[in-house]
């Protein structure tokens, strides 16, 4: 089995793959102060909960946008999965796409995974990842990752709004029935949900016009389904896209 780890700023998304198919997945909170042992014990507890012997794992791959955690994750894998091959995603691996970025090493490896998975499924694609940041990653019909757009994420925007405006409170992400909120809570909810829908619609139109090709728009990340419900610009939602990209990259380089 393959253990795939996507180390993000907020969560570490984890998946177990058997013969290229996702069997189980779970999330851990990203805590920069945790030790390799603390992460290892957490991972072991999930294996016990699922009734899976961790010795079935014969390969591990991880991507990370938190450089300070890279050594911790590597050390955890060497301690708790002794002797298992470990692979870290980088632009130097075989990817089946070319990264036409000014400096490929500055591109988040989660976006590389998303791009690889999306192109393998759909060809030319725009991946919208609703994570800590909302990122748009563009892969054209020549299998080139030509760049993208980075915006503040929904949760980041919400937190910043509450922090800077003393009379506003943090609200649950529920789309109100009407655009015009008749109270402060509905006004915030409408702005956060419909505001991001408008952002997606506008940026997808501009990206496709500039890329010069028709792209399948794939959404992933925690808020993907909620935003996709409000726009026709998103063609499909794939919650496990990053993990699927990790599995695909491992297979390409195995």
Image: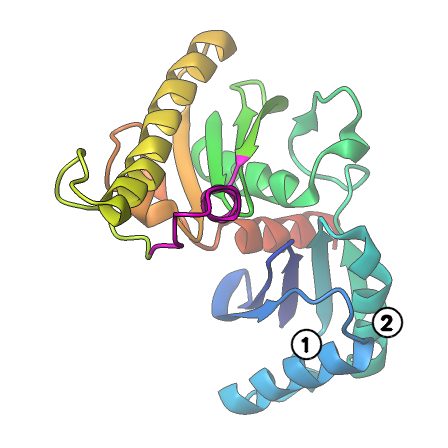
Q: Which residue occupies the foreground of this view, 94 or 72?
A: 72
Between discs 1 and 2, the one toward the N terminus: 1
Q: Quadrant of the N terminus?
A: bottom right
Number of numbered labels in the structure image: 2
Q: Position of residue 87 (x, y in %)?
A: 78, 57
Give me the disc on residue 107. none
User: Badge 2, how many Cα within 10 Å: few under 14, some, many 20+?
Assistant: some
Magenta highlight range: 152-171
242 magenta-colored:
no
Residue at the disc numbered 2? 75
Which label belongs to residue 57? Answer: 1
Disc 1: CA contacts within 10 A as few (<14), some (14-19) or many (>=20): some
Residue 33 % position (x, y): 78, 69
Q: Is residue 250 above or below residue 141?
A: below
In the displayed structure, would residue 54 be above or below residue 93? below
Name the residue at 59% across, 39% down. Answer: 116
| Residue found at x 80% / y 25% | 103
Name the mark nearer the viewer: 1 or 2: 2
Q: Which image quarter: residue 194?
A: top left
Say which element carries label 1. loop
Q: Is residue 162 visible?
A: yes
**Looking at the image, is 172 positioned above or below residue 234?**
below
The vertical placement of 92 against 244, above or below, is: above
Q: Is residue 242 left or right of residue 195?
A: right
Left or right relative to 9: residue 17:
left
The reply, left or right, for residue 198 in relation to residue 93 is: left
In this rendered view, identify the residue nearer to me: 247 or 37: 37
Outermost residue on the left side: it is 177
Q: Position of residue 208 (x, y in %)?
A: 43, 15
Magenta stretch holds residue 160: yes
x, y percent for residue 23:
48, 71
On-image quarter of the C terminus: bottom right
């Amino acid at each position: 089995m393959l253990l795939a780890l996507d180390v993000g700023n907020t969560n570490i998304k984890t998946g177990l793959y058997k013969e290229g198919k996702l069997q189980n997945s779970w999330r851990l909170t990203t805590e920069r102060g945790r030790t390799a042992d603390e992460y290892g014990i957490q991972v072991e507890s999930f294996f016990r909960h699922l009734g899976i012997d961790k010795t079935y794992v014969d390969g591990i791959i991880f991507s990370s946008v938190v450089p300070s955690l890279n050594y911790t994750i590597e050390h955890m894998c060497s301690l708790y999965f002794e002797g298992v091959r470990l692979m870290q995603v980088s632009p130097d691996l075989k990817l089946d796409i070319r990264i036409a970025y000014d400096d490929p090493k500055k591109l988040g490896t989660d976006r590389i995974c998303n791009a690889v998975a999306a192109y393998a499924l759909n060809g030319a694609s725009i991946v919208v990842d609703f994570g800590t940041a909302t990122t748009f990653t563009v892969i054209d019909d020549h299998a080139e990752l030509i760049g993208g757009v980075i915006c503040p994420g929904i949760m980041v925007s919400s937190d910043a709004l509450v922090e800077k405006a003393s009379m506003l409170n943090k609200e649950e992400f529920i789309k109100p029935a009407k655009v015009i909120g008749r109270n402060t809570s509905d006004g915030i909810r409408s702005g956060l949900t419909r505001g991001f829908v408008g952002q997606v619609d506008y940026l997808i139109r501009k990206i496709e016009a500039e890329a010069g090709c028709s792209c399948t728009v794939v959404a992933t990340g925690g808020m993907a389904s909620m935003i996709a419900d409000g726009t026709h610009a998103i063609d499909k939602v794939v919650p496990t896209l990053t993990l699927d990209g990790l599995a695909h990259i491992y297979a390409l380089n195995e």
